[in-house]
Amino acid sequence: QTTYALHAGLEVHAGATAARAGMPGKHRDEVPEPGLPLLVVPSGNLGNLTAALLAKRMGAPIGRVLAAVNRNDVFAQFLASGKFRPQLAVATPSNAMDVGHPSNAERVRALYDGDMDALRRDVAVESISDQETLDTMRRVYLEHGLFVCPHTAVGLAALQRYRERTGDAAP
């Protein structure tokens, strides 16, 4: 999983840099250097999130990591309050993410030595409802002719909300 995060960071960063480099001279100067990419990680047990943070620590070109969670939002509550409060999982369309006691939460906390401010600088989280998940699946199909699974839909909806909320335009 860490290798996937490293590869994604390298691909997106290299692609954004190459696109800027390929622009005609005067236009290239009008486009800022690409920042580090935002990595969106649909998250349940937080294994892929942990891997992404490890890749970032190892020097992968990754900016913030966006943890996209469904209504099993223990991690979102943890990031907001600093208190880890497991709960019973509830069934959602993105069932592989239906985790009420993510076992990798302790690994994430340990990576930051409990420094919640540092964790919040590196990680954002968006919690997506069942209806938003289904609406995103429908919208992607209608707009692009693509079927996406519920887990991908959670990631896409989280990205859209995060960008609207923050204005972050990182690749």
Image: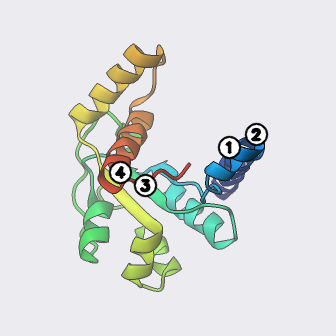
Disc 4 and disc 3: Cα gap in Å? 8 Å
Is residue 92 visible to us here? yes
Q: Name the secondary structure under disc 1.
A: helix
Residue under numbered circle 1: 27
Task: Give amino acid for label 2.
Answer: Pro
* Precedes in sequence: disc 4 or disc 2: 2
Residue under numbered circle 4: 162
Neighbour tally class for label 4: few under 14, some 14-19, many 20 plus, Cα within 10 Å: some
Vertical position of residue 81 compared to residue 61: above or below: below
Q: Name the secondary structure under disc 2.
A: loop
Residue under numbered circle 3: 168
Neighbour tally class for label 1: few under 14, some 14-19, many 20 plus, Cα within 10 Å: few
Disc 1 and disc 4: Cα gap in Å? 29 Å
**Mark 4–mark 3 CB contact (< 8 Å):** yes
Vertical position of residue 109 compared to residue 2: above or below: below
Task: Give amino acid for label 1.
Answer: His
Q: Name the secondary structure under disc 4.
A: helix
Picture residue at 71% right of the left edge, 53% below the top: 10
**Mark 1–mark 2 CB contact (< 8 Å):** yes
Is residue 69 visible to us here? no
Measured as percent of width and height from the top left, residue 79 is found at 32, 69
Q: Which mark is residue 24?
A: 2
Camera-near label (2 vs 3) is 2
